[in-house]
Structures are given as structure tokens and as C-alpha cells.
Image (cartoon, helix red, strand yellow):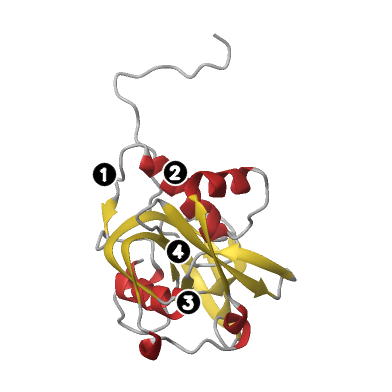
Amino acid sequence: MPGTPETTPAAKQVSDAPSPRRLLSTEKVYEGRIWDVVSDSFQLQETGEALTRDYIDHPGAVAVLPMNAAGEILLLKQYRHPVGMDLWEIPAGLLDIEGEDFVVGAARELAEEADLAAGTWNVLADFFNSPGSSSEAIRIYLARDLLDIPHHERHERTDEEAEIEFHWISLDDAVDSVLAGRLHNPSAVVGILAAAAARASGFEGLRPADAPWPAHPSQR
């Protein structure tokens, strides 16, 4: 049939891979409060012309999809100034504490933004938020067996986080919201769709919380 790919004896596994190129120079052109902008000159081929790309040098981030015993997930509404919108998101934050374990950082964000702790952790998905303009790598965890953090131990939220609102929603309704274009936060969109796919196998195929993350900036 036209447009039908040729079949092979074994399906080829599709996987992103490191691709070292010759770096000619690197320069920090902007130092920001949270992240910097760098300018790299490099060659695609040994005999090729130099190319220059400016991008955000980012420490990476983690996000958490909290799921309760009923299979509902927690979304947080938070104002995001660059887009001028209130977005429904999942708990997330920067990996800006040197040497902090990835899942420890995720647990910290879950506690600070959602007042929750989790007894069961798995990796849902890894992705680059905007690989054409940023080195930011994000890992999304699925957090289950949830417990409320006692009031006297809760983090005091400030600035935009002080306005956070909580909403528990069924996973199916969350998927519908993604496909209808009602949700736009990338971690929420990826996490919701990944969780829906993983649910088909009872979440048995998910990676453990300590699975390697070679795409994170500290590992590249």
C-alpha cells in the first residue's frame, strides 16, 4: 500500500542519542537571576563552517504527577507572567540545589507546592522543554500512596505560589482537557498523556524512581 513503511524482521528501537560536535568557543552573554544565556560556536562537520547558537543554560527541572487511590490526579492553578495566563499545572521546580538527588528534588517540590508526601515513586517521562533554545531537561515522576504533610510542617508559599489553587480531576477528564486544548503547561500535558498510556498496563512498565537520566545537563 502507498505510504506503508517497509516491514523488517525486528522493529527498530527509536532512541535519542548524544551527538558530540566540535565546540569552537562558548561565551556567557547574559547572566540572569535564575538562568543564563550562552553563545556557542561549533561545527557540524570537521570541514564545515562555524555555526553560532544562543540558548538558555538551564539546570534542569523535575515535575510530579500526584495520583490518589481513586486514580485522580492533582492539578495546581498558577499565574505565569510570560504568557499572561493562569495555567493548570502539576508540582514542579528547578534542580538548583547542587548535588541534590533528582527524586529528592521532586519530593521537595511535591511538599512545597502541594503539601503532600508520597510512598511510591516512578519515572513517567523525560523530555527537553524547548531543545532549540534551551538546555532544560525535565523528568516527570508519578507519585502515589500520598500522605498529607502536617500543617505545622508545611512550606510557606510566596509570590506567584501564594495564589496556587488545587483541583483533583480524573485522569480521563484530564486527557480530554489536553486533547481539547484546555491545558497548555508542557509538564502537565506530557505527564497526563504518559500516565494514561501507562495505566493500560497497570503502571507495571514504568521505570523506577532512581532510573538513570543521561539527558540531564549534569550527566551530559
- Residue position for label 1: 204
Residues at marks 2 and 4, CA–CA distance in whole angstroms: 19 Å
Location of residue 95 in the rendering, given as x and y in whole percent from the top left corner: 41, 77
- Residue position for label 2: 196
Residue 46 versus residue 60 in the image, above or below: above
- Residue position for label 4: 138
Residues at marks 2 and 1, CA–CA distance in whole angstroms: 13 Å
- Whether pointer 2 and pointer 4 mark residues with C-beta atoms closer than 8 Å, the reply is no
| Neighbourhood count class around disc 4 (C-alpha, 10 Å): few under 14, some 14–19, many 20 upward | many
Residues at marks 1 and 4, CA–CA distance in whole angstroms: 22 Å
Residues 52 and 128: in front is 128
Residue 88 versus residue 60 in the image, above or below: above
- Residue position for label 3: 113
- Whether pointer 3 and pointer 4 mark residues with C-beta atoms closer than 8 Å, the reply is no
Position of the N terminus by quadrant? top right
Residue 92 versus residue 203 in the image, above or below: below
Residue depicted at x 56% and y 67%: 134
**Total number of numbered labels?**
4
Q: Secondary structure at mark 2?
A: helix
Tag 4 or tag 1, which sits nearer the N-term? Answer: 4
Residue 114 appears in the figure: yes
Location of residue 15 in the rendering, given as x and y in whole percent from the top left corner: 38, 44
Q: Secondary structure at mark 3?
A: helix
